Amino acid sequence: MALTFWHSTLGKKIVMGTTGLIMIGYLCAHLLGNMKIFFGPGEFNAYGHWLRVMGAPVLHHEWGLWIARLVLLAAVVLHAVSAYQLSRRDIKARPQKYVHTKPRMSYATRTMRWGGVILGLFIVWHILDLTTGTTHSGGFQEGHPYQNVVDTFSTWYGNAIYIVAMLAMGMHVRHGFWSAAQTLGAGNRTRDRGLKAIANALAIVLTAGFISIPVGVMTGVVS
Amino acid sequence: MTSYSEYSEYTEYTVGEPVQDERAPSGPVNERWDTRRFQAKLVNPANRRKHTIIVVGTGLAGGAAGATLAEQGYHVVQFCYQDSPRRAHSIAAQGGINAAKNYRNDGDSIHRLFYDTVKGGDFRARESNVHRLAQISVEIIDQCVAQGVPFAREYGGLLDTRSFGGVQVSRTFYARGQTGQQLLLGAYQALSRQIATGNVEMHARTEMLDLIVVDGRARGIVARDLVTGEVSTYFADAVVLASGGYGNVFYLSTNAMNSNATAIWRAHRRGAYFANPCFTQIHPTCIPRSGDHQSKLTLMSESLRNDGRIWVPKAKGDTRPPAEIPEDERDYYLERIYPSFGNLVPRDIASRAAKNVCDEGRGVGPGGQGVYLDFADAIARLGRKAVEEKYGNLFDMYERITAENPYEVPMRIYPAIHYTMGGLWVDYDLQTTVPGLFAIGEANFSDHGANRLGASALMQGLADGYFVLPSTINDYLARNPHKDEVDASHPAAVEAVRETEDRLARLLAVDGDRTPDSFHRELGELVWEFCGMARTDEGLRKALDRIPQIREEFWRRLKVPGTGEEFNQSLEKANRIVDYLELAELMCLDALHRTESCGGHFREESQTPDGEAARQDEEFSYAAAWEFTDTGAAPVLHKEQLTFSHVHPTQRSYA
Amino acid sequence: MKLTLRVWRQKNPDTPGAMAVYELDGVSEDMSFLEMLDILNEELIVKGEEPVAFDHDCREGICGACSLVINGAAHGPERTTTCQLHMRSFQDGDTIDIEPWRASAFPVIKDLVVDRSAFDRVIQAGGYITAPTGAAPEAHATPVPKADAEFAFEHAECIGCGACVAACPNGAAMLFTSAKVNHLNVLPQGSPERETRVLDMVAQMDAEGFGGCTLAGECATACPKGIPLFSITAMNKEWLRATRKVKR
């Protein structure tokens, strides 16, 4: 059955929808945590520390974090592999374009594929920048996330990459959430307005929330 | 007319031996079907897969027959010219399907449906067949519901019915205005299941072009693959034609553009008698043509006459917009001529009356070929909302086609051909005069006599396909085991293929200057004029004079581009017109010979003092089965005498 | 009115096609779109050129044969079938682009004619209720709630024209497949085959090379019969349910 599931276009879509929802859930948690940045380095750094000790004393140091990372990694990989395979299939199913083209889909719908690619690249940069510090602009300090964040958003390209990626994320979430609901069979005529409203709210809150951080740094609210 | 008058020869038909149905058992009419089924020999289930049956057409009759025969275990080879069996023109039927279920407890019964159908057919149908149809009607509904046909239902979850076509009982089952579509999809799905199991070998986009008769028995067909142009032969133990009617001989009709008479006409040329070709039905409420470009006509449900009032201006050539014509300058002619039935007179009467007022020069709309169907009174009386609820979808359809809003401007309607009661002559087993060749659905002549009642075509197609043919064809197969296999090398097959290929090659070789459609249109206008709603001796002779001329010109001036070895829609069309040009002639001759009026056939010479159709039972109580001799040569008439022991013939009156 | 038509011409499946330009005069706004093409074809035949091949049959909007992409929209600018589209939807002097359905599952046969037999095979995979003739119980033995009957009807209205596939950026047949799944699965008569039906039809749909659904919604916009996008959601639900119930 699992193989039937994975080999079916519907099965892959369900994998995409489910992993997408997991990632949206993560984004919500991530945003809540990030908001602590507005309450000063103490609180934010303490939050960073807690992430490493969460689950204690049951879990060993950083085990909770690694479990979350593994789940997320699996979600990203499954999401991306499904998306890649489905996209290849879709392109093959419609090899010839119409001479007279007439885009009618919403922007969010049309940009799902490229938006996804942008987000993938962003995630890599984001980890290299703020988790491992490999590409960090200033002197990356382990255990001092507050300062690291401020450093990143003190460069123009740090802001640019981040803001563009967050806009892409917003649009991806907007079509993605609604789409996942349909794929998982949750939509119907009466529920549609509600689902669309949730999708829009999620997109706006997540985008605005995340973007508020570089804006905070630029305006000096966070420094 | 010129001295070119082949008609004189064509009209000198001879009368041959009477033809008789020898399959219907004697005895009480309500027991005959049981008796026949019991008498029929059966084929051992284990042997059925060794029998191949060809079915041509996938409409209600063909789709149902193909599926059922395959379920029984036969090997079915089926054909349709469409790209999918789901598109047969049964799909366009709107109104509903009759069945004597008596769910309303309103006094309906099998006997009443039988009676209504014989009477509605103006006493020109066979009692045994009609009674069987009424009996089976009940099973059809059960079958369709089991297949998932989404009939209209009431709040209790039970089936809804309505009354239809002036019948006093509510026996019509329906699925909004798309009953034909839903029933056809039911049959198509059943057929699809058999295609998946391999019991049905389906050839879509393949058109039958000839019948192969070996030793007097139908053993196969010649068919052209419409995509590659390849002409091939297919062989079987029996051939079933379910290819529909021949209404497209009129060019403008409510038939689908590609519905055609080639299968039945080619079978006729190979020996199957053609019965009552002049019995064609005209529907009074179609949307009129809007100009010479018109390619087909669209029917509007007859139910509109329940609330609409039909009128034309009193003065000839009055071109004022309808709103500017005062009440006293309007002629509500149906209400005037038929005070008791008014706008609800039967189809044929309403149609003829419309033609008469238009012939007087009082028609409205482009070309003066239309009458008003006015809802102003109904809207004033019931309110716009109530009218919208009843007829909203029809009004929308009308507006889409004409760009006129029927809530504000009266609709324009005009009669159009939409069904042909005539067809291949068949006996009670639905077998034609060629042994092994069966005809079902609209392709045969059997059950509707001279006029078909509303919601009865779907009933007949499904009765033939699901129940009658699958019970009767066993008998033929069991009694006629074919010892010798026939293949493409058989002289009869070689000859049929050669004739077909020659005909196609000739069509391509003419290389003249007129399109196939231009001939079709010319022929259609001619038969509509002289063999349409009202027919006269003089007019029919004119048509019979003219048809051979058109035929001659066709073979001289036709232009078909392209080749025969490819997808070529012009060639398909031209080849169908070849047959229309012969069929039209037989239709006119049949109308000429039948000097009585009955049902859809109205001879102006035979009417009552108040202008109604007058039957001549003593002379014409028979079905006219014509035998083909040669193109343009007089056919032979075989009469099947009709006897009425259960329903006594009476004259209709609607004044 | 006078029109410039740019029409896809392709001799056969193996020959590459191209847009050809035709000027057409004397078009009346009362003509249907297909009658306009008839006029073009009559002119072409008289000139000795091959007429434009296109599928059509009932011309009443119900058989589902007609299939043109007009100015980039399946069945043209109105929500109806091409045969019910009238020239009054266009202006004098317009240039109109006419192309065939585009999808790898619908290969072009000639000009504007495509092969839609993949749809038939999707139905053959399970788009039916197994009810051999003669085996039916009395019609009133199983009442069907009115709401279910109407839900079934709404989906049964699909005419199988393929506009959904033509309009879908992924060439997906989800709307078509879901219409039949929903029609039959909601009815009590269809329930014994409920799970196998949806699994088999979806598998066949994939096997035919149709694309996947990205919920773009183009299919439902193009559908001349108004099959809603939620039809797809409902099928997804059926499929998910079936994968849990059926062990394969």
Image (cartoon, helix red, strand yellow):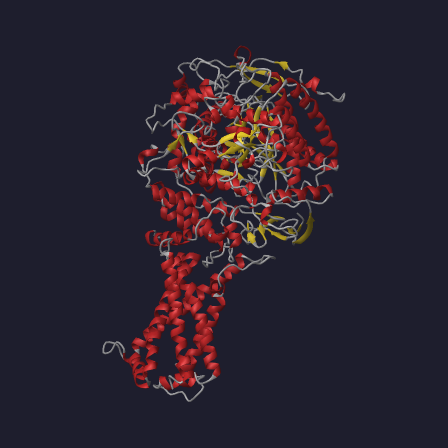
- In the orientation shown, which residue stands out farthest toward the right? B3
Percent across and percent down for residue C209 are 51, 54
Residue sitting at 44 percent across and 52 percent down?
C203
Mark count = 0
Q: Position of residue B161 (x, y in %)?
A: 38, 32
Residue B123, visible in the rendered structure: yes
Q: Percent from the top left, x then y, of residue B467?
A: 43, 28
- B318 relative to B542, above or below: below
Is B218 on the left or on the right of B107, as rendered?
Answer: right
Q: Who is closer to the viewer here, A100 or B314? A: B314
Instruction: Looking at this view, name the residue that lies furthest to the bottom.
Output: A139
- Residue at the top extreme of this rendering: B618
Q: Does residue B571 sit above or below B169 in this rendering? A: below
Residue B25 sits above or below residue B255 on the image: above
Q: Quadrant of residue B516?
A: top right
Q: Is residue A61 visible?
A: no
Q: Residue at x 70, y 22 (%)?
A: B545
Q: Quadrant of residue B256?
A: top right
Relative to the observer, which residue lies in front, A142 or C56?
C56
Residue nearest the observer in this picture, C125 or B343: B343
**How far across and down, in percent of the image, does residue B525 sit?**
65, 30
